[in-house]
Image: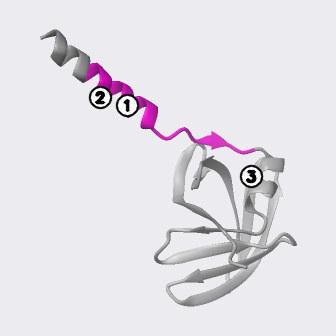
Amino acid sequence: MRRASLILGACLLSTIVGAAQFKRLSSVEIKRTLAQRIITDDAHWSDRFDANGNLHSMELGQARTGIWRVNGNELCTVRNTKKAEEECFEVWVDNDEIELRRDGIAVISAFLRSRPQ
């Protein structure tokens, strides 16, 4: 019985330790983290953030452009479409995982990748 309790405790501890530890980024951290990087789901879409504020997107083989900026502690993007609207998100990261959130709720979950040279 004691051994089973120890095993169960070890399993719970490893689950807690292995859980994601997302951290919300400040405005300075957003700029430093995203400039010259890519956010992607590694399959269907990607957003490349140039240091000069240009945004290059690829979604299901279709290229799009836009701009990005930091407003307060949020990432804001405008995509060049017929009905261009600014979208702003909180940015949360855990190693190479990234979440764009609104009011603390994940709207987009993806990966942060280095820009190919």
| Corner quadrant of residue 33 | bottom right
Tag 3: Cα neighbours inside 10 Å, few (<14), some, or many (≥20)? many
Quarter that holds the N terminus:
top left
In this picture, which residue range is highlighted in magenta?
8-25
Q: Which residue is mark 1?
A: 14
Please identify the residue farthest to the bottom as the structure is shown.
62
| Corner quadrant of residue 53 | bottom right
Q: Which residue is mark 2?
A: 11
Q: Amino acid at mark 2?
A: Cys
Instruction: Of the two numbered discs 3 and 1 on the same chain, state the one appearing first in sequence.
Output: 1
Q: Residue 37: horizontal and vertical position, in percent?
A: 71, 67
Residue ID at (74%, 52%):
74
Measured along the vertical axis of the image, is residue 68 above or below residue 30?
below
| Residue 95 lies in the magenta stretch | no
Q: Residue 79: horizontal and vertical position, in percent?
A: 70, 77
Q: Could you say whether the residue bearing mark 2 is in a helix, strand or loop?
A: helix
Residue 75 relative to residue 5: left or right: right
Measured along the vertical axis of the image, is residue 56 above or below residue 23?
below
Q: Which residue is mark 3?
A: 74
